[in-house]
Image: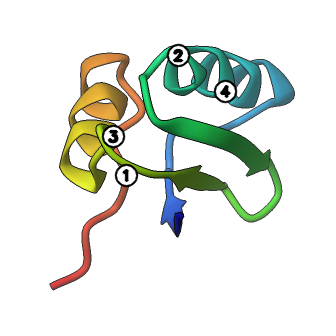
Amino acid sequence: MQNETLVVPNISCAGCVGAIKFELGELPGVAAVDGDVNRRTIEVAFEAPATLGGIVALLQEIDYPPRQDN
């Protein structure tokens, strides 16, 4: 099981977190999703067939792109 914490600047309320939890929860391999409105973070626990790239792509698709620091 892999765990990732993603910073999602577009999170502004509990409804945003709820929408993200619902959408990511539909991905095969995603075991758990939690969010923190104040920190604007999403924590995702997943395993194959889910991938971090697929999770990021879905977040971008639903207008909650995570911040990507290089």
Instruction: Report if the CB atoms under discs 4 and 2 are less than 8 Å apart.
Output: yes
Residue displayed at 52% across by 16% down:
23
Residue 20 to residue 67: above or below: above
Residues at marks 1 and 4, CA–CA distance in whole angstroms: 14 Å
Which picture quadrant has residue 15? top right
Which residue is tagged 1? 66
Q: Tell me which amino acid carries mark 2.
A: Glu
Earlier residue among tags 4 and 3: 4
Which residue is tagged 4? 21
Residue 7: image x %, image y %?
Answer: 51, 62
Going by the image, does 45 lie left or right of 13? left
> Which of the numbered marks, if any, corresponds to residue 23?
2
Callout 2: SS: helix
Going by the image, does 26 lie left or right of 64? right
Q: Tell me which amino acid carries mark 1.
A: Pro
Q: Tell me which amino acid carries mark 3.
A: Ala
Earlier residue among tags 1 and 2: 2
